[in-house]
C-alpha cells in the first residue's frame, strides 16, 4: 500500500502483517546478543553484525550502534548512559515477553539529542533503523482547535509504523506517522479497548461515535466488535488521515467491501486543524464507517439521529471543568450513553 509519507510500500494489509508477526522479533538458533546496562555507556567493543542466518540483531546491540553514531557526530559526549540515545519503537509494536531481535527496517528512533547528520547516517548505516525523529517538549497533536499544533521532526527515513492491539474479536492493526501522533504502544491489556468492550456489551449499540479518534483504534475495535455503524472524528489532520488508512488496512477482518477516500493526505495536511467537520473517508460492507476531520463540538451537525454510544477521549482529561462542559453539551445535542476511555 502506498505510504503517504515516503511513497514506498511501508503500509501492508493486516493479514500480511499478522501472518509474519509471531516470529518477527524472535531469534533463530544462530542468533547471539549481549545485554547492556542501559544506565551506563556501552562497552568499547566492536558492534555486532546482524545474524548471518536470519539477518536479525539483538536490540541492545542495535542501540549501541546508534549510540556510537551519535557520539561520532557530537550529539552525545560518550559519557551519557545508553538510554540517552533515545526511545526505540519497534515496527510493528505488540506486547512482547522478552527483548526483541530486530530485522531490517524495524525500528523508529525518537530522540531529543539526535541531529541531522547522525540521523542520515543511522538510516544509511544501521540496517534496523527505518526512521529517525527528533522529539521536543509536549506531545504531537493538538489539545484544542484553537491551540497551536505540536509535531516532532522527521529527520531521516520514514516514521510510519504499526501497532497491533488485541480485542475480544481478534487483533486490529493501527498505523500512524510517529512524528505527528502520540505513542500508544500495545501492552498486555489496553484499558481503553476494555472500556469500549464493556460499554458495547452493556448498550448493544447500533451506532458508535469516537469523537476524538486519534489513529482510529477505538472506532476500528468497535467495528471489529460488530457495531453496524461507526463514526470517527478528529480535528487533527494526521489522526483523520490515519484513521482512514487503517480502515483500508483492516478491511478484511471488518467485512468492509470498499473504502472511499474523499480527501488525500496532502489535502488534509494543508489545513492541519479543522473546525467544521469535513468528510474524509467512508467504508461500506458488513459495517458502515464514516471518518470526519473537525471540531467535536461541531460534529453533531453531521451526525445521524439516535446515537447509542459515544466515546469522548479528550486530549486533556485533567481539565475536569472543560471535560464536564463538553460532556454536558454533547449529552444535550446528541444524547445516548457517553463514556470517557
Image (cartoon, grey):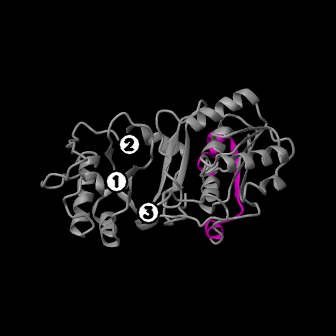
Near-viewer residue (300 or 255): 300
Q: Earlier in the sequence, mark 3 or mark 2?
A: 2
**Which quadrant would the C terminus be assigned to in this image?**
top right
| Of the image marks 3 and 1, the number of the one nearer the N terminus | 1
Q: Residue 104: which numbered mark, if any?
A: 1
Residue assigned mark 3: 136
> Of tags 3 and 2, which is closer to the observer?
3
Q: Is residue 23 magenta?
A: no
Q: How many marks?
A: 3
Q: Is residue 263 visible?
A: yes
Tell me the residue at 29%/47% (across/down). Answer: 59
Instruction: State the image quarter where residue 2 is shown.
Output: bottom right
Residue at image mark 2: 24
In the depicted structure, whether residue 42 falls above or below residue 168? below
Estimate how packed mark 2 is, as few (under 14), some (14 to 19) or many (20 or more) residues with alpha carbons within 10 Å: some
Q: Secondary structure at mark 2?
A: helix
Q: Nearer the viewer, residue 235 or 138?
A: 138
* Residue 183: image location, x then y, percent: 49, 51
Left or right of residue 306: residue 217: left
- Binning the other alpha carbons within 10 Å of mark 3 as few (below 14), some (14 to 19) or many (20 upward) gives some
289 sits left or right of 137 in the view: right
Give, as a single range, the part of the protein colored magenta.
248-269
Residue 289 visible? The answer is: no
User: Where residue 83 sits: x, y (%)?
Assistant: 29, 51
Q: Look at the numbered disc 3 and give the secondary structure of its residue.
A: loop
Q: Earlier in the sequence, mark 1 or mark 2?
A: 2
Q: Is residue 259 left or right of residue 307?
A: left
Question: Which residue extends farthest right?
Answer: 305
> Measured along the vertical axis of the image, is residue 282 above or below residue 36?
below
Where does residue 122 sit, x and y in percent of width and height? 31, 64
Name, please, the residue furthest toward the front. Answer: 321
Amino acid at each position: 500500500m502506498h505510504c503517504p509519507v515516503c511513497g514506498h510500500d511501508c503500509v501492508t494489509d493486516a493479514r500480511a502483517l499478522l501472518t509474519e508477526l509471531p516470529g518477527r522479533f524472535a531469534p533463530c538458533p544462530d542468533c547471539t546478543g549481549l545485554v547492556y546496562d542501559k544506565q551506563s555507556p556501552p562497552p568499547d567493543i566492536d558492534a555486532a553484525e546482524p545474524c548471518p542466518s536470519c539477518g536479525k540483531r539483538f536490540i541492545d546491540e542495535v542501540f549501541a550502534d546508534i549510540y556510537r553514531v551519535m557520539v561520532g557526530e557530537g550529539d552525545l559526549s560518550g559519557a551519557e548512559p545508553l538510554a540517552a540515545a533515545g526511545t526505540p519503537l519497534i515496527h510493528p509494536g505488540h506486547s512482547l515477553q522478552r527483548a526483541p531481535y530486530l530485522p531490517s527496517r524495524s525500528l523508529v528512533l525518537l530522540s531529543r539529542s539526535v541531529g541531522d547528520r547522525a540521523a542520515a547516517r543511522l538510516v544509511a548505516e544501521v540496517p534496523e533503523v527505518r526512521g529517525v525523529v527528533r522529539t521536543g517538549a509536549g506531545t504531537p497533536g493538538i489539545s484544542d482547535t484553537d491551540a497551536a499544533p505540536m509535531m516532532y521532526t522527521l529527520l531521516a527515513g520514514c516514521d510510519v509504523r504499526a501497532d497491533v492491539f488485541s480485542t475480544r474479536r481478534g487483533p486490529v492493526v493501527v498505523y500512524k506517522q510517529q512524528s505527528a501522533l502520540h505513542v500508544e504502544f500495545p501492552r498486555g491489556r489496553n484499558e481503553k479497548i476494555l472500556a469500549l468492550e464493556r460499554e458495547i456489551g452493556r448498550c448493544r449499540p447500533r451506532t458508535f461515535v469516537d469523537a476524538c479518534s486519534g489513529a482510529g483504534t477505538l472506532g476500528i475495535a468497535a467495528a471489529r466488535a460488530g457495531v453496524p455503524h461507526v463514526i470517527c472524528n478528529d480535528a487533527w489532520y494526521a489522526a483523520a488521515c490515519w484513521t482512514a488508512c487503517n480502515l483500508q488496512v483492516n478491511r478484511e477482518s471488518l467485512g468492509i467491501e470498499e473504502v472511499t477516500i474523499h480527501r488525500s493526505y496532502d489535502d488534509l495536511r494543508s489545513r492541519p486543524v479543522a473546525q467544521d467537520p469535513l468528510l474524509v473517508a467512508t467504508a461500506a460492507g458488513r459495517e458502515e464507517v464514516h471518518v470526519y476531520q473537525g471540531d467535536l463540538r461541531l460534529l453533531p451537525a453531521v451526525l445521524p439521529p439516535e446515537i447509542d454510544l459515544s466515546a469522548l477521549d479528550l486530549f486533556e482529561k485533567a481539565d475536569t471543568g472543560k471535560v464536564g462542559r463538553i460532556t454536558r453539551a454533547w449529552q444535550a445535542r446528541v444524547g445516548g450513553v457517553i463514556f470517557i476511555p
